[in-house]
Amino acid sequence: MVFNAIFLSILALILIAAALYAVMQKDLLYAVIATGIISLVLSVYFFIMQAPDVALTEAAIGIALTTIIFIITIRHTSRREDEIPVTKEPDRGDND
Amino acid sequence: MKKAIVILLLAVVGYSLAVTFADIKFGASRLGNIAEQENVGSFYLTETVKNLSVANVVTAIVVNYRGFDTLGEVTVLFLAASALGSILYRRRKEGEHEEMISKNSSQLLQSGAKLIFPAILVLGAYVFIHGHLTPGGGFQGGAIIATGFLLMFMSYKDYHVSHSVLMWVESLAGVLFVTVGFWGLITEQSFLQNTLAPGVVNDLVSGGIIPIIYIAVGFKVAAELTGVLETLLNFKSNK
């Protein structure tokens, strides 16, 4: 019981630290990876809290798919938060 | 001035939150004792196994008792995927593909991806076929299958999934879901009513329409998420 409480507290601390890092970090790639860590810890949390269905969803969508979609978006925009975003109109391929 | 408005707004929100939560004792169970018969939790826990023969109570609630909500969820995902596609999709010439990944990955990643890809597909299919027996279900299984396709997209630069195949799989799965729903409406009283025999607990074929619906949802979610990834990876901005 005590071990369980200590383990959950450590997980919660990792969760908060990763969340703060994701908010503070100006390099968006690191921030996205930090959100991936949040999803990983949350998934372990859900499993310990006896919700394996939610844990599976969090693992598949939170860790893999959301992270990758954010990384693709960062590749198309700018990597650092303080950079001036690209204002050029993207080519929509309408001119064919 | 702007700051004052923000502080005022925050104060209003904080006050209403404090008023709402002031009465609730910290850590007290608001659901009551789950063993008491009049609670809804106890109803689900006893009735699911007795009447529906479904081992996973969560699945029974999601698909059977709240089936219409699940249809709404699937629709939301479909609308999000089609909105993304309508923004980012480019008409291409025959056989032309934009490549986001400029070169193939390393030999190690390619061989590993090829080796592990069928296993991921089987795991995803297992998760949604056994949705009523073990944890997981259509959404989870579909997402797992989409991660398998993601691995292949990342490893091979000329790996593509045909959009028309995805469209057909997705549409047929959606039509199957709604057809099962209307079948319940025609033969019994309500939409998505469980009309089939429940069978024996822990059998693969048990729970009536639940496995059918979850297989449809699994295919639909897998096709939608794979389509999203394919669209995103093939989008090329002229940065």
Image (tube, rainbow, N blue to C red):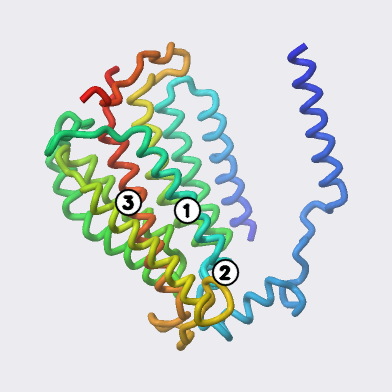
Which badge, 2 or 3, is on the more N-terminal residue?
Answer: 2
**Residue kind at label 1, given as amino acid type:** Thr
Q: Secondary structure at mark 1?
A: helix
- For mark 2, name the chain: B
Residue A44 in the image: above or below residue B185:
above
Quadrant position of residue B58: bottom right
Residue at 40 percent of width and 51 percent of height: A60
Residue B54 appears in view: no
Residue at 54 percent of width and 76 percent of height: B193
Between tags 2 and 1, which lies in front? Answer: 1
Q: Nearer the viewer, residue B46 or B115?
A: B46
Q: Which residue is mark 1?
A: B75
Which badge, 1 or 3, is on the more N-terminal residue?
Answer: 1
Q: Nearer the viewer, residue B193 or B14?
A: B193
Left or right position of B26 against B185: right
Residue B23 image offset from top left, x and y in percent: 87, 50
**Residue kind at label 2, given as amino acid type:** Ile
User: For the residues marked 2 and 1, what is the alpha-carbon distance in whole angstroms?
Assistant: 18 Å
Quadrant in which the C terminus of chain B appears: top left
Quadrant position of residue B7: top right
Residue B146 numbered mark, or none: 3
Residue B200 numbered mark, or none: none
**Same chain letter for marks 1 and 3:** yes
Between tags 1 and 3, which lies in front? Answer: 1
Quadrant in which the N terminus of chain B appears: top right
Residue B178 image offset from top left, x and y in percent: 45, 66
